[in-house]
Amino acid sequence: MDWNDLRYALAVSRAGTLAAAARRLKVDQTTVARRLAAIERALGTRLFERIDGGLRPTRAGEAALARAVRIEQEIEGLERDIGGSDSKIAGTVRITAVPVLVNHLLVPASAALHAAHPELRLELIAESRNASLTRREADIALRLARPESGRSLLARRLGRVGYAVYGPRRKRARLPWISYEEGLAHLPQARWIESVRGNRETAPLALSDTESILQAVRAGLGKSLLPCFVADADPALRTLGDDKIVLTRELWVITHGAIRHDARIAVVVDWLDRLVKTRLS
């Protein structure tokens, strides 16, 4: 079995489609399909099945990918320890976070990090779902809740994100609540809005993430609970009510224990720490 074929299987697992894996690996889609077929022939089983237009690992695929991740970690460790990569800040670091953190916290500050370390490349994954660090879908995760404990993961609280009620700068007689769609009703922001809104009115708009809600409030469609570090800097928004911060959420950084000594990971985690202290404190 060729290790390079395992790399292609890991890329498909992390990207979800052949086309996205091809872009990540900088090859054509046909190559990805051919290498994936080669490893499935070698193992004598299917590693992926097509669900809702994407590729998801089968049970056999999950087992194979778990071993592939361990092999990948061993190879990266060998390159780091023998190749001297600890002395040079270079390579790619994948960070996953919800879209509002990527768009309003990480992207604006990334130029300074690149200026300090020109050979360091950030890959920012803006997703509402929690990407798996164990399967190496990302190297670092920023999450708005204390993560579940895991022997292979290291977590540290960076700070807190404050939320307040905001509406559009242009005043309107009536501003309905804008909240999250039903599948996200468990979020603290959604629960707070529901407790205030009650049964007095029906929310005319329900959205799937904070970034979308921010744009809806900016467009004058209603009011909602938004992170202060974003909304306070937006001239199109104004705070509503007497209270400022009505809800806070913890912001945690999580890394995989196997790469905790990698210099590029340490540099990025330190950058995140300083960034949060500057923007959120």
Image: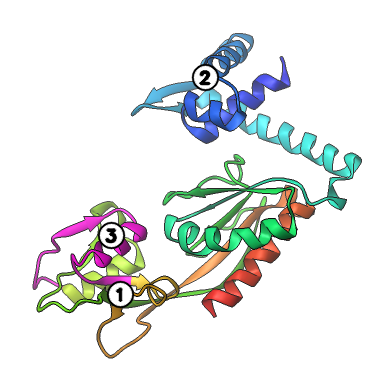
Q: Earlier in the sequence, mark 1 or mark 2?
A: 2
The percent coordinates of residue 25 (x first, y second) are 61, 29
The percent coordinates of residue 106 (x first, y second) are 55, 60
Say what amino acid the circle numbered 3 marks. Answer: Ala
Magenta span has 220? yes
Say what amino acid the circle numbered 2 marks. Answer: Gln
- Crowd band around label 1 with a 10 angstrom C-alpha radius: few (<14), some (14–19), many (20+): many
Disc 1 marks which residue? 237
Disc 2 marks which residue? 29
The percent coordinates of residue 242 (x first, y second) are 27, 90
Q: Is 249 situated left or right of 32 in this image?
A: left
Say what amino acid the circle numbered 1 marks. Answer: Leu
Location of the C terminus by quadrant is bottom right
Q: Is residue 86 above or below residue 27?
A: below
Magenta span has 194? no
At horizontal 84% and vertical 50% (from top left) the residue drawn is 88
Which residue range is magenta in the image?
198-225
Q: Earlier in the sequence, mark 3 or mark 2?
A: 2
At horizontal 51% and vertical 64% (from top left) the residue drawn is 105
The percent coordinates of residue 157 (x first, y second) are 59, 69
